[in-house]
Image (cartoon, rainbow, N blue to C red):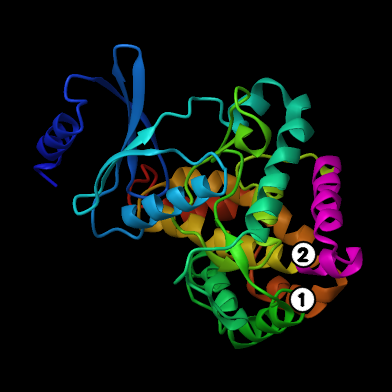
Amino acid sequence: MADRPAEITVFLARAGWGRAGRHHLAGDASDRRYERLRLGAATAVLMDNPPGGADDPAAFASMARHLRSLGLSAPAILAEDLSRGFLLLEDLGDDVFARLLTADPAREAELYAPAVDVLLHLQTASHPPGLPNLSARDWATAAGFALDWYAFAARGAKPDGADFHAALAAALTAHADGPRVLILRDYHAENLLWLPGREGLARVGLLDFQLGQLGQPGYDLVSLLQDARRDVRPETEAAMIARFANAAGADPSAFAAHYATLGAQRALRILGVFVRLCLVAGKPQYLRLIPRVWGQLQQNLDHPALTDLRAICNRLLPAPSPELLHKIERQCPTSSSR
């Protein structure tokens, strides 16, 4: 890593961008970082994804090419050095959904409708071979992050999760274990861009899809509408669920159980992920998002299909009061209040 700046300089020179101006663009919950490059009137984006991390730049490049083959707006790959974790990407601009909606919340339905239509198109197309395809029990195990990290940090001990995993696996098997489709995993307002100069589905720019795998139709819809980082209006959520279910020909009652089950699984996992980011990665800022995720979890657990799981979660998981979140933050290695 000490030679990383020099490696970047060599990569950019070989790609013809050695003289470009550079400035930091963004980072995220992973080790990836981005820079915007400017060379005359042209721009591009450098993805710096150090080898050995959880995310594979080869997976990003492969999925980007697949999405583009479907007529969707993933960034074009302009140059790559996968062994060192460098990608030079088409610059799709700055009009991220989250930023546009902060400036004008009234545009929510306008932007979310085509984003839902992208999912419908994506899920009716063929998917790349060899993608991970987890069982319902695997998805239940992934949600165990809520016990391993959130409950552990809150109470100082990891609870016995046997009945938790059994109840969630049963719900997933009953309501969210049908034919698999391609899911992108992190399909939300900070990973979608509005490209009004393009037409149709290509108006929705796609980012952060390297973890794409096989999963259930409602998963990315939940990711979009139960966003950990912003509140989606209830009327928008209801309208987009109906849009998706109607287009997919799904029974509304069955789809409601499907959506709630996937929403509960996702919220449980995110609770644990956010605490882990605090305790392991020294990123306490993610704790501020936990009350929203907790509210989404309660919304999903209110569905009658999840009665058993709700009772177990009420017993094992304490509500994220300000006092509890402060207690967890004090455990963060970067906390000044330790």
- SS class, disc 2: helix
Percent of width and height locating residue 12: 19, 32
Relative to 278, say whether 173 is above or below: below
Would you say residue 321 is visible in this rendering?
A: no
- SS class, disc 1: helix
Would you say residue 305 is visible in this rendering?
A: yes
Relative to 322, say whether 159 is above or below: below
Disc 1 residue crowd, few under 14, some 14–19, many 20+, Cα 10 Å: many
Q: Using residue 298 as the reference point, say whether residue 334 is left or right of it.
A: left
Relative to 6, say whether 99 is above or below: above
Examine the structure image and report whether residue 41 is included in the region drawn in magenta. no
Instruction: Point out the tag, 2 or 1, that comes first from the N-terminus.
Output: 1
Relative to 225, say whether 194 is above or below: above
Identify the mark at residue 260; answer none if there is no mark: 2
Which residue is located at x 54 percent, y 79 percent? 138
Which residue is located at x 44 percent, y 46 percent? 284
Percent of width and height locating residue 190: 55, 38
> In the depicted view, which residue is nearer to us: 35 or 196?
196
Tag in front: 2 or 1: 1
The type of residue carrying mark 2 is Ala
The type of residue carrying mark 1 is His
Percent of width and height locating residue 118: 66, 46
Q: Using residue 281 as the reference point, say whether residue 121 is left or right of it.
A: right
Residue segment shown in magenta: 235-260
Which residue is located at x 65 percent, y 30 percent? 199
- Cα separation, mark 2 vs mark 1, equals 9 Å
Identify the mark at residue 274; answer none if there is no mark: none
SS assignment for the magenta stretch, majority: helix
Do the residues under discs 2 and 1 have CB atoms within 8 angstroms? yes
| Residue that mark 1 sits on | 175
Disc 2 residue crowd, few under 14, some 14–19, many 20+, Cα 10 Å: many
> In the depicted view, which residue is nearer to us: 168 or 325?
168
